[in-house]
Amino acid sequence: MIGVTDMAERWLWISMLVCGSAFSIEGCAPGDGPSLAGSTSDGGSASAEDAAAPPEDAGLQEDAQSPGLDAGSDDAGDDDAPAPPGFGLMHTSAQLELAREHRSQPPWQGATEQLLVEAQAALARTPEPKEDFDIPFYYGDPEASQAAKEGLRQDAMAAYALALGYQLADEAAARDLYASKALEFLDAWAAVNKSVSGDDGDLVVIYTGIPLLYAADLVWGYEGWDATSRDAFVGWVSGVLQPSAEAIKDRANNWGDWGTLGVVASTALRADTASVLGEADRIRARIASEIAENGELPEENKRTNSGMWYTFFAMTAMTTAAHIVRNTTGQDLFGYVAPNGRSIELALDQEFFYAVHPEQWPYPLPDGLAGELWQLLYPCDDTIQLPTPGGWPGTLFEVMSDAYGVAEWESWVELYRPLHGYHGWIFSTLMRQSS
């Protein structure tokens, strides 16, 4: 049940609303939400994923490019071999080589087959860039919001599948075909998209568009991507996507996590190590301030029925940013424990508890008029969104069980492999470093 203190705080805000008081709530900006429930895109329904000075870290690498460039494949030097990733954002050369070496073994076999099916299907898609990426407030008009983001979502997913297919396909002809098609999506958005607008635009352009950056990194050295086109894409990242990320990275809730990820990925793609390290400091500060003593994320719990989903959404962004930081600078935020004892693992532990025991979720939406008024402050679903190992947050725990070596997390998801996500971690099973 909701605690007395929590309810007192809620009624304070509700009474302010009823009295017509003007107020604002830090971090409660419109559109933090999942997309259309039950959809196959960014949904937040039970069936969807188809929705202080920190201490120095040991092992800091000075060259942001080295993790992605140092470990070539066994067929390095072969003209038919894929070029290594440019900076190792989501995939380092070593991680890709491991996937190649184990492609005939579970869990990589099924995950590779899943990827290549998706890459093959993406060959038939025509890019749909928009000059202005205008996304209305989701909770005001879910259908319109979903429709407005769908072009970028599908283009980015297609580009990423194709670029990863370029890295992992067996045949040279297929690799070349996939890389060339991936470039169509990258070049189209770089050429056409000039702005982001709408209540939800800054958030949505990041969580739907970030796979374009993964794709660019994977085809960075492909001979078919000329320097002029590559520079144009980097210009789009720095001129369109990163400004949206900068605009929201200080938010207290999941918007801030996605904004931080957007800046991390944008600056890492330009080998701007200093900026990536600055965002690593931001992540440390967010770990200390965003995570409660018991591992919960209070800003996300305000979303009551949707709180478990929003916690997953926020932790997906934070862990993805930590992954890119580690790949491109060597700093390990996964093992970081803040002076107040908060850590990424602590938050994951608590989210996992509720994922396994959703009936113990203590923050349901109040009944009646109180709930209706509460939803005006913190939009959420009418019923509690239930987690699943094969959807959300399974896609997150598939990767995190490997990163932390937590057997309980892994046993929860292993029967559902290969897992495929739509937020941050996309081809989750392919990201594994161990069987």
Image: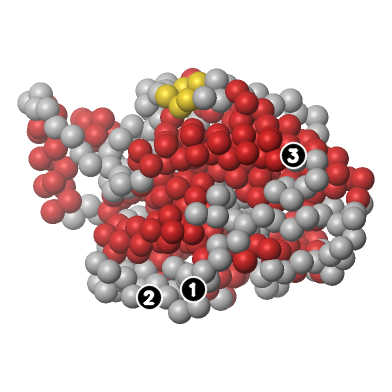
Query: Which color mode does the image show?
Result: secondary structure
Tag 2 near tag 3, CB within 8 Å: no
Residue 254 seen in this snapshot: no
Say which quadrant the N terminus sits in.
Answer: bottom left
Question: Dot 1: within a 10 Å radius of its alpha carbon, few (fewer than 14), some, or many (20 or more) residues?
Answer: some
Identified at 41% across, 50% down, the residue is 260
**Where is residue 395 shown, x and y percent of the image?**
58, 55
Question: Dot 3: within a 10 Å radius of its alpha carbon, few (fewer than 14), some, or many (20 or more) residues?
Answer: few
**Where is residue 124 shown, x and y percent of the image?**
80, 29
In the rendered view, tell whether residue 209 sits above or below residue 359.
above
Secondary element under disc 1, as helix, strand or loop, is loop
- Residue, disc 2: 56
Secondary element under disc 3, as helix, strand or loop, is loop
Secondary element under disc 2, as helix, strand or loop, is loop
- Residue, disc 1: 60
Q: Amino acid at mark 2?
A: Glu
Report the Cα–Cα distance between label 2 and label 3. Answer: 39 Å
Tag 2 near tag 1, CB within 8 Å: yes
- Residue, disc 3: 226
In the rendered view, tell whether residue 134 sits above or below residue 345.
above
In the rendered view, tell whether residue 287 sits above or below residue 213.
below
Sooner in the amino-acid sequence: mark 1 or mark 3: 1
Q: Amino acid at mark 3?
A: Asp
